Image (cartoon, helix red, strand yellow):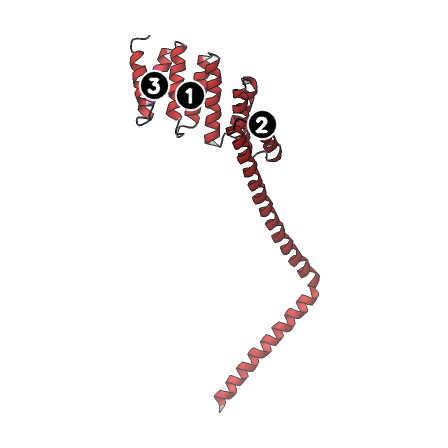
Amino acid sequence: MLKPRKRLVKAKLKEDRFVILTAKAEVWFEEHRQHVLYGVVAVVAAVALGLAIGWSKSSTAKNAAFDEMMARDAFARAAFDSALIRANAILEDYSGTSSAAVALMLKGRIFEQRAQFEEAFKAYEEVIDDYSDQAYLAFGAYYALGTIAHGKSDWEKAAEYYEKAASKYPDHFNAAVALLEAGKALDKAHRYPQAKSVYNKILKDYPKSRSVDAARDNLAKLEFMP
């Protein structure tokens, strides 16, 4: 008969401890009610703020992507005035985003089409300065600057831009093409040793590119050049 009594005593002790702990918790809560409420409010506010920021960023990204698509479409239709207006709006509303980088490239293309080369130059330079981490666009900006310089018969400057495009973004799918254009420009500038060096770089670093055959042919033509 002693064992059942011991179990009852233990059960009673557990129950008493639970009651005591509950009572202490109630007393502590009453003493710290205000602080607890402040803490709960703070946590709820932080969660709400996080959700609002996330929603805002998502909404901004979607709006920027839509405006970018409309600007691209206007450019593709040769509606350059409309494309320029949309590009400027993107730059004003979504500065620092990838859509802003695209807008700058569109501005550069539009100015090129209109033979406004100084304005195009500024747009491409801005892409390089502010969005160098976006390899596809930055490479395109360097290449476009090379094309502008080439159009002005500034062969050495053109070669410089083409080489920068390839050296800064060697994994770009058109890196070998940029080097080929650099070699051609150096050839026209009568910088034959430099041209040979560029062509050899294509053969060495991009042996499977579509520029290899042209590089090899051009290199052969320069074989007896000083």
| Observer-nearest of 144 and 164 | 144
Q: Check residue 197 for magenta coloring.
A: yes
Residue occupying the point 62% across, 35% down = 93
- Rounded to the nearest whole Å, what is the CA distance between mark 1 and mark 2? 29 Å
Highlighted magenta segment, given as a residue range: 196-202
* Kind of residue at disc 3: Tyr
The disc, 1 or 3, on the residue closer to the chain's N-terminal end is 1
Quadrant including the C terminus: top left
Residue 219 position, x and y percent, is 31, 15
* Residue linked to disc 2: 84
Residue 11 position, x and y percent, is 54, 81
| Observer-nearest of 67 and 161 | 67
* Kind of residue at disc 2: Leu
The disc, 2 or 3, on the residue closer to the chain's N-terminal end is 2
The disc, 1 or 2, on the residue closer to the chain's N-terminal end is 2
- Is residue 101 visible to the viewer in this orientation of the structure? no
* Residue linked to disc 3: 199
Quick one: SS at disc 3? helix
- Rounded to the nearest whole Å, what is the CA distance between mark 2 and mark 3? 38 Å
Magenta segment's dominant SS is: helix
How dense is the environment of label 1, judged by Cα within 10 Å: few (below 14), some, or many (20 and up)? many
Labels 2 and 3 touching (C-beta < 8 A): no
Residue 120 position, x and y percent, is 54, 21
Residue 163 bears which disc, if any?
A: 1
Q: Check residue 209 for magenta coloring.
A: no
* Kind of residue at disc 1: Glu
Decide: is 94 above or below 184. Answer: below
Residue occupying the point 49% across, 20% down = 145
